[in-house]
Amino acid sequence: MKYYSIHVFYSRKNGYSIPFKTTVEGEEEIINAAVKKGKLASDDADSVDSVDEIDATEYKLMGGK
């Protein structure tokens, strides 16, 4: 299992990041898995700026369960 931070940015002032854990790899696959699991709105998938791998501690600090 790997942990990721998915960053969604609409503009320099608006955006958010979500923690996500999965076994899939590749940015597009991770985004699709997050949408499929309901962690990321499908409308927001087009606004993903980056997907960064993080450790378990950071995942939990971001609110991941």
Image (cartoon, rainbow, N blue to C red):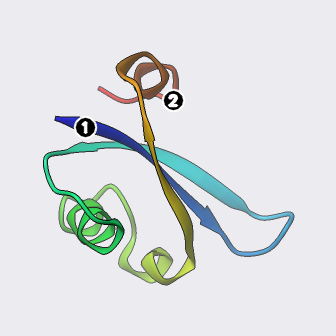
Mark 2 vs mark 1, foreground winner is 1
- The image quadrant that residue 8 belongs to is bottom right
Residue matched to label 2: 62
Q: Quadrant of the C terminus?
A: top left
- Image side of residue 31 versus residue 49, left or right: left
| Viewer-side residue, 28 vs 11 | 28
**Residue found 43% across the figure and 16% down from its top:** 57
Q: Position of residue 38 (x, y in %)?
A: 26, 60
N-terminal of the two: label 2 or label 1? 1
Q: Position of residue 19 (x, y in %)?
A: 42, 41
- Image side of residue 64 versus residue 48, left or right: left
Q: Position of residue 27 (x, y in %)?
A: 35, 67
As helix, strand or loop, the secondary structure at mark 1 comes to strand
- Image side of residue 13 versus residue 62, left or right: right
Residue 54, relative to residue 61: is it above or below? below
Residue matched to label 1: 2
Q: Tell me the amino acid under the disc marked 1.
A: Lys
**Residue found 33% across the figure and 55% down from its top:** 39
Q: Residues within 10 Å of mark 1 (few under 14, many from 20)?
A: some
| Viewer-side residue, 41 vs 4 | 4
Q: Residues within 10 Å of mark 2 (few under 14, many from 20)?
A: some
- The image quadrant that residue 28 belongs to is bottom left
- CB under 8 Å between callouts 2 and 1? no
State how many labels appear. 2
As helix, strand or loop, the secondary structure at mark 2 comes to loop
